[in-house]
Amino acid sequence: MHVIFLILILYIIQGEKMKRKKGRTKQIILLVLIVEVLLIIFMLCYIQFRSKVVKVVTIEAGPPLTSAELFLRDKNIQDSTLMNMNSLDFNNPGSYEVQIKVGNKMYTSTLKIVDTVPPSATVVNQLILKDAIIEAKDFVSDISDSTAVTVSYKETPDFSKYEDQEVTVVLEDTSNNKKELKATLTVLDINSTVTIEAGSLMDITIADFVNNDKYNVSFETDLQKLDISKPTIHEIVLNVDGKTAKANIQVIDTTAPTATMGNLEIWKGESPQAISFVTNIVDVTSVKASYIGTPDFTLLGEQAVNIIIEDESGNKAELTALIIVKEDTQAPVIAGVVDRIVNIGKTVSYKSGVSVTDNKDELIDFKVDSSQVNLREVGSYQVTYTATDTSGNKATVTATIDVTDSGISEEEVAKMSQDILDEIMTEDMTKVEIAWEIYQWTKGHISYTGSSDKSDWVAEAYRGIKNGVGDCFTYFAVAQALLNQADIDNIGVTRVGGETHHYWSLIDCGDGWYHFDSCPNKDHKKTFMMTDAEVEEYTQMRGNNYYTFDKTLYPPTPLE
C-alpha cells in the first residue's frame, strides 16, 4: 500500500513542477510521508495483536480431538493446548465454546460437531414360529454410529404369512441420517409358546408345538431340567429341519390356594391380621390374606370372619372362621413376696425372688413401695408391691420387714456358708448338683430339736451352722444361706393352716421353680426338687396341711 502513496507523491511532484509552486509541494510530500508511516505502524500492530486461532472449527462427530492444530492460524506454532476437551461430548452434535492456550495467552473459539454419516449395521435374517412377533432391531447387529440409533420397520412384516418375506429396516441416528437394510423373515407353522400348569409334571412333547408333518422338529433344550414349580417363561431351542428356532414354555398358575381356617381368640382392642386365621397354606407362590369387611374387634363374644386368600397369580379363595373377643378383668399375680427379717443397718433386696404373671400380658413390671421401712431402727414395717397390666387391672401385695438387732451379720454367715460350699462343691458341678449337695449337707448336719428363733433368719442360720440343732425354720435358714452364697435363686415358703408353722424353699436352678425342703420327715420321703403336684399329693397323704401354702404368692412349678 505504501507503493501507491509513493506513486501519488511523484504525481504531485510532477504537477507541482508544472505549477511551479515549490513551497506547497513540500508540504504535501511531508503529509503523505506521515500517512505512510502511520499505515506501516498500523499493519505491524495488526499482525502482532490479531488472534492466533480461527473463530470456528467444524468436525464430524466421533473420536475426541487431542490436538489444537485445527484451531491455529499458523500451523507451525508448537506451544498450544486444548483446555476443556474432557467436558465435551464429541458424539453429540452441536456448537461448543473451546479454550486454546497458545504460549501464555488464552484464546476462545467455537467447535461445531456435525453428524453427516448414516449408521451402519450387520443384517441378521430371522427364523421365527407362528404367533411370535419380533422387533425391527432383531434384524440387525453390530450397529455403528457416533450417536444413538433407532431401528424401525419401513413396513411392518406380516407375521401370519408362513413363507419367506423380505423385510426392510430403517436405521436412523439423532442427526436424522438414515440407512435402509434388507433382511429375510421366515415364519414357520409351529407354535411359539406352549403353556403348562405350575407344580405339574413336565409332559410337553413335540406334538404340542407342531401338529403337521411339514417339518422335522426336535428339542435341543432338555425340558426335564426346567423348573416348572413356579410361574415363569422358559426360552427353549427347537431344531427345525436342521435350523434352530426359539420357542417358549410358559409356566402358568391357574389354581387357587388352599388353606385351613382356625378360630381365633383375642382380647378386646387387639387387631389381628387376616393371615392370623390361616394355616396349612398350599400354593406354588406366596399367599396373602385380607378381610372381606373388617371385623369389629371391640365387640365382645363370637362373630364370623370372612377372609380372602390370594396368590401371586391372582387366584383367590374365600374362607370363613370365628373370632372370639374377650375382655381382660383379671389382675396380675405377684409371686414370691415374703416377710423378711433383716439386721439393723443392713440392706434388703426387695425384688429378689419376686415375679409377676398375667393371664394376658407376657411381661409386666412391678413397683415396690418401701418408703415406710427404716432399716436403721429396730421394728416391724410394711412394704407394698403393686403391678398393673395393660388392661388397667391392678394387684397389690404387702409384706413385713422385721428389723432386728441380733448382732450377727450377713457377711459373717456368708463366710461360714462359703467355707461349707468349698468342701461340698466342685467347679464342674451344675446348679442342680450344687443344690443337691446343699440339701444333703443341711439335712445331715442339723439335728431336729423342735425349737428355733424365728425372729431373725440370719441369726438362726448362724446358730444352725455353728450348733447343728434346731427345727424346720433352722433347716430353712441354713439352706437359704447356702443357696444365696451359691447364687441359686430361692424363695421362702410358709405353711398356711395346720397346727404349727412349717418353712421350706422354692429354688430355680435355671429350668423353673421347684420345692426344696431339707427338713427331715417321719416318712423319710425325699423332698428335693418337688413339683406343686408332688407336694399336694404328699400333703393329702400326710395331712395336717403339711405343704399347704398360698399359691397366689409364689410362681408355679413345671408340671413334672
Image: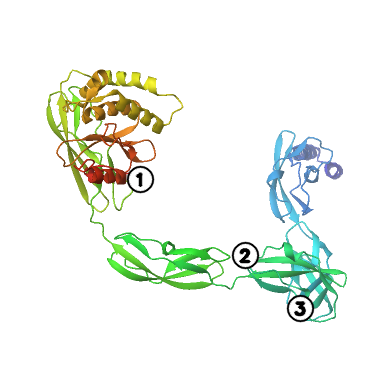
Q: Give the structural element (helix, strand or loop) at label 1.
A: loop
Answer with left or right where residue 105 lies relative to residue 337: right
Q: In which quarter of the image is the N terminus?
A: top right
Report if residue 27 is visible in the image: yes
Between tags 1 and 2, which lies in front?
Answer: 1
Q: How has the structure been colored for display?
A: rainbow
Report if residue 556 is visible in the image: no
Q: Would you say the residues marked 1 and 3 are in contact, meaning their CB atoms lie under 8 Å apart?
A: no
Indicate which disc, 3 or 2, sits on the residue closer to the N terminus: 3
Q: Which amino acid does label 1 sit on?
A: Pro
Q: Which amino acid does label 3 sit on?
A: Phe
Indicate which disc, 1 or 3, sits on the residue closer to the N terminus: 3
Indicate which disc, 1 or 2, sits on the residue closer to the N terminus: 2
Image: 198 above or below 414? below
Residue nearer the viewer, 486 or 538 = 538
Image: 128 above or below 79? below
| Residue corresponding to mark 2 | 230
| Residue corresponding to mark 1 | 558
Residue nearer the viewer, 256 or 355 = 355
Residue occupying the point 28% across, 67% down: 301
| Residue corresponding to mark 3 | 159
Kindly report the distance in space between the C-alpha atoms of the residues bearing marks 1 and 2: 46 Å
Residue 65 place in picture, x, y as percent = 77, 46
Q: Give the structural element (helix, strand or loop) at label 3.
A: loop
Q: Within 10 Å of the Cα at label 2, are there few (<14), some (14-19), or many (20+) other Cα atoms?
A: some
